[in-house]
Amino acid sequence: MAVFVKAADLGSFTAAGTALGLSSQMVGKHVSFLEERLGAQLLQRSTRRQSLTAVGRTFYERCRVVLAEVEAAEATARESATTPRGRLRVSAPVTFGSIALAPVISDFLRIRPHVEVALDLTDHYVDVVGEGYDAVIRLGPLKDSELMARALAPYKLIACASPVYLAARGAPRTPEDLSKHDCLGFVFASGQPFAEWRFDKEGKVYEVQVRSRFQVNDARVLQAAALDGQGIILQADLIVADDLAAGRLVQVLPDYETPKRPMHILFAATRPPTQTLRRFIDHVVRCFGKDSGPGRHQSSRGT
């Protein structure tokens, strides 16, 4: 297959032989062997150049895929005996990436001195394969695709406000009470504010349209506004955990469950992950994961 593909790429047995260190006659024997095995002509021969037949074109395209997989398998085997090295391109949501993932990447780089990581923070949907990412952190339910997924702990939200705000306005007792409060809204990449907050208690779901006098697309700014007594925020626990522990913020509606969004780390299924990528994924799963083995998502596969 390798000889046939090289002959097709270079257009002649002589050029292929020179590239592969074979005689043109030996190249011809390789191609003839394939044609006899398949019972079809692959190359249309002339005195100066060969061109692919219709069957040859189809076979050529599949051969390229097979040879690429062989090369990747050999590279993976060679790499398994070496130190992880190289550059990884990673994408993650802005809030999670800047607050939680960045320190974890720093730890990974500290123990992997030959690895580089380029972290792209965006709340926009990214095409893992098309845009050349090695791994992507994604929030929300997975959709059907050809990506591999490892589950991470869900992204949990908490409603909270400063003691100053609650002393002035009182604490909401039910989700419906939020309609009477100043709720600080997060604006998503789509431009739509998070105007509907959801809660759950004993299986009953409460959906509340909140009023947001202040809206911003940066979770840190919302956190600062809440600390300044501007209103109630619904934000990830990883953002407000320290403020809650120190009493600078107080959880509201603690008897109600707040939304949890699934979170996964995704990578391409079309090429075997390098040792460096495998080590990075394992590191992220150890830091943020729950019990979950490698593989495709159960009924659907990553987005």
Image (cartoon, rainbow, N blue to C red):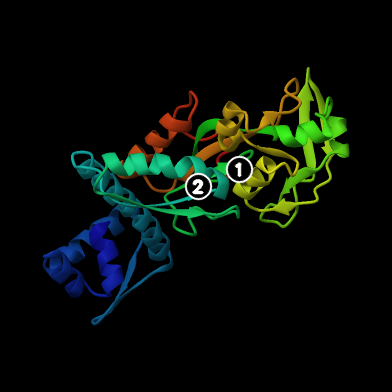
The residue at which mark 2 appears reads as 98
| Dot 1: element | loop
* Residue furthest top as drawn: 202
| Dot 2: element | helix
* Mark closer to the observer (1, 2): 2
Task: Residue 234: give x, y in percent of width and height.
Answer: 70, 38
Would residue 262 appear left or right of 191 to someone viewing this image?
left
Number of callouts: 2
Dot 1, crowdedness within 10 Å: few (<14), some or many (≥20)?
Answer: few
Task: Residue 176: give x, y in percent of width and height.
Answer: 87, 31
Would residue 160 appear left or right of 195 to someone viewing this image?
left
Task: Residue 119: give x, y in percent of width and height.
Answer: 44, 52
Vertical order, 36 against 274 (above or below): below
In front of the other: 272 or 36: 272
Residue drawn at (43%, 48%), measured in percent from left and top? 270
* Mark 1: amino acid: Asp
Residue drawn at (57%, 46%), measured in percent from left and top? 95
Task: Inspect this view and state whether residue 87 appears.
Answer: yes
Which label belongs to residue 29?
none
Q: Quadrant of residue 44?
A: bottom left
Marks 1 and 2 close (CB-CB < 8 Å): no
| Quarter of the figure that contains the C terminus | top right
Residue drawn at (25%, 43%), measured in percent from left and top? 84
Would residue 286 appear left or right of 218 to someone viewing this image?
left
Task: Inspect this view and state whether residue 274 appears.
Answer: no
Would residue 208 appear left or right of 75 to someone viewing this image?
right
Q: CA distance from mark 1 to mark 2?
A: 28 Å
In front of the other: 228 or 40: 228
* Mark 2: amino acid: Ser
Which label belongs to residue 144?
1
In front of the other: 142 or 110: 110
Q: Earlier in the sequence, mark 1 or mark 2?
A: 2
